[in-house]
Amino acid sequence: MQSLWIPRELKVAPYLDPDIRPRPMRPRYALLLNPFYPKDPHASFGKHVLTPTLALTSIAGATPPEWQVVYWDENLLQGPPPWQPFPQVVGITVHLTFAKRAYALAHWYRSRGARVILGGLHVLSCPDEAAPHADALALGEGVQLWPRILRDVERGMLARVYQGDYRVPYRADPPPRRELLSRRDFLCSASAESGRSHRSG
């Protein structure tokens, strides 16, 4: 297959400045992060992110009203992830494709005082690998777990592992926070979930 030129911004993750020293964190401020992954020049250009992650917008929908929540997708090429104001909690979804980047983001925020929660398919499959990179792991259905995690952060009683249950019906979930999205950056923002599975044992 012919080698195609691809812009650096589509190949290399945004720079995480080691010299940044943020001001004290903002209480009850949560940042939800979708990490960067290198783009394939033989796939789509332009709006290379076809649809936003439904997982993070759904978790945002479960955020208690007294918390402020921000969604950030590194694949929209907006530069380094935000740190002003500095979040008290950072939730990062982890897939195999971008696990290394997710762990780098986790280290950057944790080393500056944020509580980092890792979830997603890779964390569910490889919790022992992910655990050293996080303050807590969300295994399974994160929408159920997120309010409990934030309450435990407020109480100073954050557990190392939270286990969700995929058997809870869809109708129990709050609607996703689609208003957090920059819709012009996606081909379609009306993503939907068509099935739910759970791992037994």
Image (cartoon, rainbow, N blue to C red):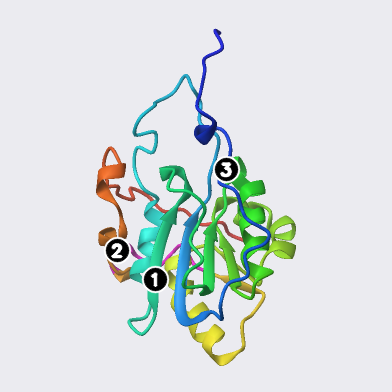
Q: Residue 180 location, x and y as percent?
A: 30, 61
Magenta span includes 67: no
Sooner in the amino-acid sequence: mark 2 or mark 3: 3
Q: Is residue 10 above or below residue 120?
A: above
**Residue to which mark 2 is pinned:** 177
**Residue to which mark 3 is pinned:** 13
**Residue drawn 58% across the image and 59% down it:** 200
- Mark sitting on residue 27: none
The one nearer the camera, 145 or 13, is 13
The one nearer the camera, 28 or 178, is 28
- Mark 1 element type: strand
The amino acid at mark 2 is Arg
Callout 3 crowding tier (Cα within 10 Å): few <14, some 14–19, many ≥20: some
Could you tell me which quadrant the C terminus lies in? bottom right
The amino acid at mark 1 is Val
Callout 1 crowding tier (Cα within 10 Å): few <14, some 14–19, many ≥20: many
Q: Residue 97 location, x and y as percent?
A: 59, 40
Q: Which residues are magenta?
A: 164-171
Magenta span includes 166: yes
Sooner in the amino-acid sequence: mark 3 or mark 1: 3
